[in-house]
Amino acid sequence: MKPILLALSLTLLLVAGFAAHASQADSEAAQLYVRCKGCHGADGSKPQDGHVIQGMSVEKLEETMLGYKNGTYGGPKKAIMMSQMGRLSETQIKSLAEYVAGF
């Protein structure tokens, strides 16, 4: 009986740890998105150059943001986006893409 209780306790601790980590990552991504709200809206539904980011896949968002960061993507507002994405690490961009894809 004790080994089963020990195993269950360890499993619960692991699950709680993963949930806390995910919650922290979401919180950090939400803080990163604060800079984006002015142009893209609180939920990503505000059109920019005829496009909205709401509903885009994680892959497309990450590809686009990395393109802005590297200067290989963009239209009329490329300079604005390059400056915004240039401040972020690739890890932060991935987190932000996952956050925005959840809208």
Image (cartoon, rainbow, N blue to C red):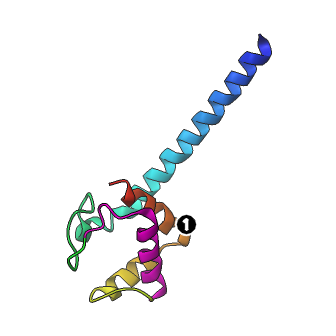
Q: Which residue does the image show at 36% across and 62% down from the upper left?
A: 33
Q: Quarter of the image holding residue 96?
A: bottom left
Q: Which of 53 and 84 is in front in this view?
A: 53
**Residue assigned mark 1:** 91
Q: Which percent across, then down, holds residue 93?
A: 48, 68
Membership of 57 in magenta stretch: yes
Amino acid type at image mark 1: Thr
In percent of width and height, residue 86 lies at 46, 80
How many C-alpha atoms fall within 10 Å of the one at disc 1: few (<14), some, or many (≥20)?
few
Q: Is 79 positioned to the left or the right of 49 in the image?
A: right
Residue 7, compared with residue 54, is above or below; it is: above
The x, y position of residue 64, in whole percent, is 41, 76
Residue at the top extreme? 1
The image quadrant where one finds the C terminus is: bottom left
Residue for point 41% across, 69% down: 61
x, y percent for residue 20: 54, 41
Q: Give the range drawn in magenta.
A: 52-71
Label 1 residue SS: helix
Residue 93 included in the magenta stretch of the image: no
